[in-house]
Amino acid sequence: MQMNNTLTISLLQSNIHWEDKAANLAMFSSKIRAIQEQTEIIILPEMFNTGFSMNPGSLAENMDGETVTWMKQMAAEKRSILTGSLIIRDQEKYYNRLIWMQPNGVYGYYDKRHLFSFAGEDKEFTPGNKRLIAQLKGWKINTQICYDLRFPIWSRQANENEYDILLFVASWPMKRIEAWKALLTARAIENQCYVIGLNRTGMDGNGFEYSGDSMLIDPMGVALFSNHHEEITHTFQIDKKQVQEVRERLPFLKDKDQFVLV
């Protein structure tokens, strides 16, 4: 196995202290520092510093705020990319924003496209309109957030090799967890890519329970990892050759419908 084809990733499936930034940043600092392996990407859940809250007025930060500053510090300390979403205020609008923080402090971001109207997210937040496909060591990683999972056109490969990994960070309630598992698997099969779904555990301030069930799924739809309910840090290595071999052996993406996102 050639190392330039591999990627080492750590998932932090964790409970989240409700609307308590200090407690969450302290907790995740401890969990990140406890990772023994040399990992290249560390993934945190959706709204990891507050929980999935509809109170952006009191919880939002600017891009130079406490949590983004903390992400810069932790990414530099671990010499790893750190990613997860939080509530950001930008030009007087609120976004559920995923930050892709590199060890050198340079970052990209993705604003959640599909806002969860069932919980009123669309009333408090502004939807994004651009995808972020991050690149690392020749890998291309399409970053998305929770409810985006239900909308396959947004994550569909626009060409045969647009990305190799589809990543979802989430706060997906246990009562709909079977949909989570089925949709993650479908996204892997239809896009012939690895899919990583990182979900939280525990109970939030609204009384919703989360079972984790974070998953790593290969390009054939086979679950390589899943964990139910535990708070766990899981580090794994994937090989880009598997994506290439599946697409060469089964060139289904060549027959896909053509479309343009607007």
Image (tube, rainbow, N blue to C red):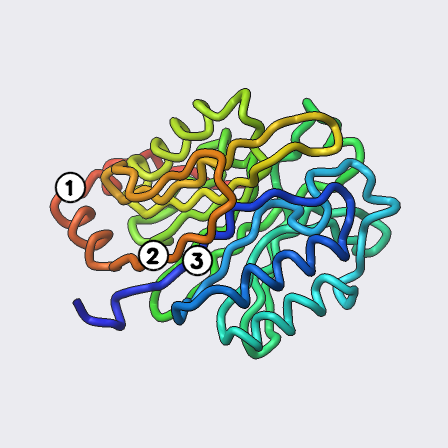
Disc on the earlier residue, 2 or 1 = 2
Q: Residues within 10 Å of mark 3 (few under 14, many from 20)?
A: many
The kind of residue tagged 1 is Leu
Q: Which mark is residue 102?
A: none
Q: Which residue matches tag 2?
A: 236
Q: Is residue 188 above or below residue 238?
A: above
Q: Is residue 145 left or right of residue 133?
A: right
Q: Which residue matches tag 1?
A: 250
Instruction: Name the residue rendered at 82%, 44% in the picture.
Output: 56
Residue 210 position by quadrant: top right
x, y percentage for residue 173? 58, 28
Q: Is residue 150 above or below residue 5?
A: above
Pick the front one: 144 or 259:
144
Is label 3 in a helix, a strand or a loop?
A: strand
Q: Is residue 33 visible?
A: yes
Instruction: Name the residue rendered at 78%, 36% in the picture.
Output: 54
Q: In the image, which is nearer the foreground, mark 2 or mark 1?
A: 2
C-alpha span from label 2 to label 3: 7 Å
Instruction: Name the residue rendered at 33%, 43% in the picture.
Output: 225
Q: Which residue matches tag 3?
A: 10
